[in-house]
Structure formats: structure tokens, C-alpha cells
Amino acid sequence: MRFHRTLLLTAMMLATSLSGVSAQVPSPTVEGPIDVGRFFVAATIFNLADVGYMREEYFIAGTATAFTSASDLTPDGMWTVTPGGTAAYKTRMVIYRPIDAKDFKGTVLVEWLNVSGGLDAAPDWIAAHVEMIRSGMVWVGVSAQFAGVEVGSSGGAFLPPLKGFSPVRYRSLRHPGDSFSYDMYAQAGQAIRDASETAILGGFKVKRLIAIGESQSAFRMTTYINAMHPRNQLYDGFLVHSRGGGAAGLSQGPQPVIEAPTPTLIRTDLEVPVLTFQTETDLFRLGSIASRQPDTKRVRLWEVAGTAHADAYTLATGWDDIRTLVDDDHPLVVGKLTDIVDVVERTSATPIPGLIECDRPINSGPQHWVLNAAIAALDRWVRRGKPPRKAPRLEVTEGPNPSFVLDEHGNVRGGVRTPWVDAPIATLSGEGQTGSTFCGIFGTTVLFDDAKLTSLYPTTRAFVKTHKKATKRALRKRFLRKKDAKLMRLWAKESNIGG
């Protein structure tokens, strides 16, 4: 039985010995777990208990600060910001955590919830929940932006924001505007830091706090890294997933507007690691090619071949995917492998009928498999100080209007490689899509016809051999996880692809 409790954490809350904690970030008051009205976050739909996890929701409240800069923000990201106006706020954070404390391995991932659709969505949880769960991580989703909370905000393409969706549960929330979002996000992280000595997270001892954000949230994550992290040193690492060439503004109206330049790079004086994860769509449609920068001791860039900004897994298959969670401690029925792995089964042009109806089958590439590896690599980097392997960039043409360099199958050359492009059965692209709302970011899948498949793989054995070699290469470079590769090999053996 769950009991409602209210936890009041003052600004001078319990100090901890965790690396990176700073008194510059106030501890908010925390209320919860919340158990009235209807809960909402656009995330996975399976029963968390089936994988040994549970959900809680808390409200956090306090005074947030907006920040300003005396000079223009520079492309190198080496920004110095100072406190500006303040405002009261109250927002929420969603927590998915192991039920049994023995399953928690010390890492908490804090996702800046995405509001591109006018509501709070958790694209990184959807795409990489398999890795988070089997690694015993805690996931926290933070409602950091106005559009996800307040009725009357722009957006709402699918469902209303929190206060419109469930007034009974969320009526007390108050978001003063996105200029305050960076400090609100920091205070959410501080609440989790404090949770090591409180009832949040069941009293789990937090060892590592990693900030993550995808798409619009990645734009804001870039600004947070450059502007906020040097001030508060709160997070131990960052995953910037599918950013553009610029970054989110430091300040929006009614405060004086302070825009970020394009390009905006990740600052190079960091003491914590940053892994930037990019799909094909991001380079040209979002303009991230302008923000390419060399790898450093603390910065890595992975550009993944055969991927789109969002795809069949993030829109459909991933929402109820627990069948790939094969773990000795939590044995689960894998189910029919083709439901999870087979690219042929995930090429629908209408992933959400009536809402998202595209003109061509959307991308069904390897993004989520590589994202699993990226999450593991970043966690390992934070824990051990050893950066992940450097990855080649996706190949593009020279000149003022660059485009991708394609192989004889229409797949891009370079980048992080997987069996999807090195043992191909389709042309997978982050481009070329048209149709209804958002279709342009979903890329395309064009399956090879039987004649081409037979010419490439005269027998199923030939396909399995090629697929195995490609998988082995990706594993050696740690661009795939071993358990995922095992499923891929099983699928290849049962695929009957080839003459």
C-alpha cells in the first residue's frame, strides 16, 4: 500500500559527499509521491512492475533564477552568465526506479522532458529504457518547460499540457517561463542529490547524476552545459541527443531576449564528459553539421548511419518493448523475435493513424540499439574516466551545399556502423520523407526487392555470415551492447533472407 507523504527540503538541506555538488543550487521543497487525479507523461505503456520497476511522481517548488549575459553569447560556448530576475515556480518530476534497492547500481539519468508536441514526452526513456532497466538505473523526467505544464501555451498537437490534461492533479503547478527552465532543471537535479538521505528514491544512495535530453531538449541541454554547468557543477555527465547547429536562447520574453548563435559548440573546458548523439536527419534538417567539433578528452560525437531523428521504434515498437529485456535476474519471455528486431516489420508509413501519416515507410534503423550503447558508454565514462571510442563522421560532399555521400545501396558512408548498413536489406535514410505533421523528421525505409537480396546474399547462410561480421565489428567498437547483438544474431539465423 502506498501512503501519501510530504517532504519539505529547505535550501540548506543535507550536504552530501557526491562529486559536483554545489551550494549554488538551492534545494527545492518536495511534495509527494502524488496520488490524486490522472497521471501523464508520454512514455512507455508496459507495466513497470513486470520488469522490477515502479513509478512515483513528485512536485518540486521554490524560487528560480533567470540568467543574463553582459556580452553576446559566442559560438565557442565559453559563456559567462550572471543571475537576473527571480520567480516562484512549482513543477513536477517523474521517477522510474527499481523496486528492489539491490537492483540499483547508483546512476540516475535526468531527462529534460521534450515539449515539441505541446506536452511532456520522454523520447530518451522510450528509445533506451531497455538499457536503463537492465543496468539498474533510475530515470527521472523533469517538466522543465512552460509548454508542458501550462494551459494556453503554444503546441498541444496531440494532447493538452499537464494542467489541461488533469486539472485535479496538476492545478497547483506554476511555470514562470522558459527563461527560468535552466535553474528549475538544476534544482530538480539538486532534489535528487538530496534524495540520498531522504525518502525520495526509496533512500537509494545516488552515486552519479547524468543529464539527458533529445531534440528540442538537446538544444536546451547545450545551453545548460555552456551557461549553467560552470556555475553549479551539479551533473556528472551529459547526453545531448539530436541537437541542431545552434542552441536554445538563454533568456526568453518577458525578460530581455538573449539568443544563442549558430553555430554553438560545446565548451571545451569541461571537467565532466559530454556525449553528443546525432542521426542523419540532424545534420541537414536541423543544421547540426554547423556545430561539428573535434573530439576532446571530455567531448565525443557519435553520428549514426541509417538513422532518423525519430523512427519506427520511438513511435511504435518501443512503447511496449520489454521482450528484449533478457536478464538472468529477471527472465522474461522474449516473444517472437521479428516483432522486435526485423526491419521488415517496422516500416509502416502511418505509425499513428489519424495523427502521423507519412507518404513513405518511415525509418526503421538502428538508432535505439546504438543509443543503448551510448547510455552504457557515458555511464562507464563517468564511473571510470575512460572515454568511449572515437567515431568517424558521416561522410558529406565538399562545397557550399553539402549532401551525404552514399554507397551503392543508397546508404550513407561513414559514421557509427551497424549491420543495418553493413549487411543491408534496405536503404535507410534520415531524409526524403513527406506527409502530415512532423513526417519530415522520420526518414525513410526502402526495402530491397527479392532480386537484389538474392544478388547480395545467394543463400541465407551468406546473409548470416555478412550480418555476423558486421555485428562483430560494431561490438568490438562498443557501438552495440552484447545482449542486443545476441538478439540480432538470432534474428539473422531465423530471417530466411537470401536466395
Image (cartoon, rainbow, N blue to C red):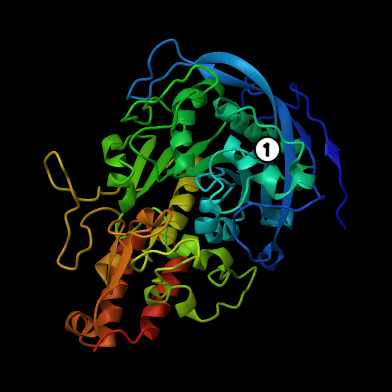
Extreme residue toward the top, this view: 70
Q: Is residue 33 visible?
A: no
Q: Is residue 186 above or below residue 155?
A: above
Circle 1 sits in a helix, a strand or a loop, which is it? helix
Q: Amino acid at mark 1?
A: Ile
Quadrant that contains the N terminus: bottom right
- Name the spot of residue 30 as percent of width and height, x first: 77, 35
Q: Is residue 39 left or right of residue 139?
A: right
- Name the spot of residue 411 as percent of width and height, x first: 23, 62
Q: Residue at x 31, y 56 (%)?
A: 430
Q: Is residue 84 above or below residue 341?
A: above
Q: Residue at x 56, y 23 (%)?
A: 232
Q: Is residue 122 visible?
A: yes
Q: Is residue 258 left or right of residue 195?
A: left
Q: Residue at x 36, y 39 (%)?
A: 244
Say which of 58 and 136 sits in front.
58
Near mark 1 (Cα within 10 A), the count class, few <14, some 14-19 or many ≥20, is: many
Q: Is residue 326 left or right of residue 342?
A: right
Quadrant that contains the C terminus: bottom left
Extreme residue toward the left, this view: 399
Say which of 110 and 108 sits in front.
110
- Name the spot of residue 318 as percent of width and height, x first: 52, 64
Number of on-image labels:
1
List the residue tagged with mark 1.
192
Q: Residue at x 17, y 82 (%)?
A: 455
- Name the spot of residue 389 as percent of width and height, x first: 34, 48
